[in-house]
Amino acid sequence: MDGTDVSMKDTTQQIRAIVREHARLSVEVDALADESDLYQAGMTSHASVNLMLALEDGFDIEFPERMLRRRAFESIAAIRAALDELLRGKPGSN
Amino acid sequence: MTNPTGSTVGTELRADLVGKAARIGAEVAGPAAGSVDREARFPSESFAALRREHMLAAFVPEELGGSGCSISDLSAICTTLGQSCASTAMVYAMHQIQVACMVRHGKSPFFRQYLTDLAGHEWLMASATTEIGVGGDVRTSICAVERAGGRFKLEKQAPVISYGLHSDAILVTARRAPDAAGSDQVIVLAPRANGTTLEQTSGWDTLGMRGTCSLGFTLRTEGAEDQILPQPYAEISAQTMLPFSHIVWTSLWLGIATDAVNRARTFIRAEARKKPGTTPPGSLRLAEVVTLLQTMRATVHDAVREYERIMDDTDALSSIGFAIRMNNLKVAASHLVVDVVARAMSICGIMGYKEDSKYSICRHLRDAYGASLMIANDRIYAANAALLLVHKDE
């Protein structure tokens, strides 16, 4: 996957696809709003680590230590905000 | 207590509380430790004394009737009690973990009032976190809170509720609702005298930590909805229950190790007196074990300092790096306590191996093994192994 030059909407779609595959939710991702709490939707802390790894791989980024917080991964919108910050600093992105 | 340097009130409070713990240890808990261990009975006399000295409410804020002590004060108290009776120290530690969860996360009028009552009556808090069927994973529940009309009901199959029968109330983890995911948990307050029953399902005849009376029960409770702590358990666990547990447990293990080394030191000293001018052969072993004890003490105190520094920074408390370090504290100290105590026993030789000698290290060694077995290290290693995949040590 290459997330460096996709539109904002596609980034969210890509996050949703990764969440669907790795967050092991007890509900369908499509039923969740961007702001829904992923932990309440059944994501365990173990699954959240897998989600972080899959996001790092999918977007070719590394979350710095300061972002490795429960809150940074609590919703699709929160992940989106963290990724936006990281992708903005990446060469070739705009 | 007098304080010639005229330093802060906090220091005086610490000296006062630790002084009381030392007195209770020497006069009550220590003398009873042998019978508590042999009979696997609750250390009632220790807790009567702790109640008399208002020690159960030590962490309750002053405005609610407690002493308002710090986590480093509790750490020092647990180490002191651990030198006399590890079971007493463990029960005291577990009680303070529950109190801390309510102090730090029970900001509602109900919990403020409950803490005031707890301080007034010196109530003893137990906990029911593990559950039959979850394989020891406390961050998953099967049982669920059922709510209706401002009331709730809950039934939990708890393989262990330490000193459940001797407690005044129990904090119970459960799924937030019958349709909630296993990891979507809350904490419920279950007062023993009001709406809660315990039906015993297993006993507690173990190698060590016998006075904790960690029997299994079917717990049934019902009450008003405001007995449910408002914050999700995931946050309470990361910010308070986990770091608090690991700090107070390792503090009391440090107490076990300290007393074992003290016995070894006394033994070597007695040997030295028999042949003045010669160094007893065991003194090198003593020098070795003292370095390990110092490592253990530094490990515990470093964690206390870090937690105290970021205690009110919820963001820092939920970081992966902090979780890894608090897990490391527990596994490191649980290995060290067995190592230190076993070395102390070999220094004392047969006198350490005998239950009825004043140099006996038997109870210490049996209690020390509880550190890695009552709370399994492999689960903690597995958690860290996962966290290390994304952690960057910056």
Image (cartoon, coloured by chain):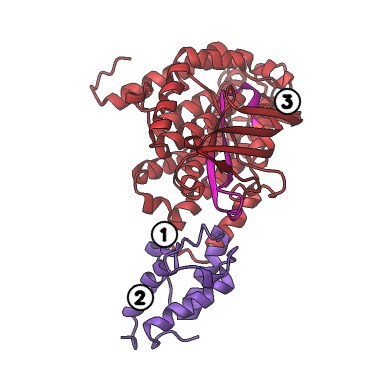
Chain colours: A purple, B red
For image coordinates 23% across by 22% down, the residue present is B6
Q: CA distance from mark 3 to mark 1?
A: 52 Å
Looking at the rendering, which quadrant does residue A6 occupy?
Answer: bottom left
- Determine whether label 3 and label 2 are within 8 Å by CB: no
Question: Which residues, given as a range, are shown in magenta?
Answer: B162-187
For mark 2, does the 10 Å Cα neighbourhood hold few (<14), some (14 to 19), or many (20 or more) residues?
Answer: some
Residue B229 numbered tag: none
Q: Which residue is mark 2?
A: A84
* Image location of residue B322, percent across then percent down: 44, 52
Q: Chain of mark 3?
A: B
The answer to whether B363 appears left or right of B110 in the picture is right
Which residue is painted at 64% across and 18% down in the image? B33
Taking B36 as reference, is B214 above or below it? Answer: below
Residue labelled with disc 1:
A71
What chain does badge 1 belong to? A
Look at label 1 and name its amino acid: Arg
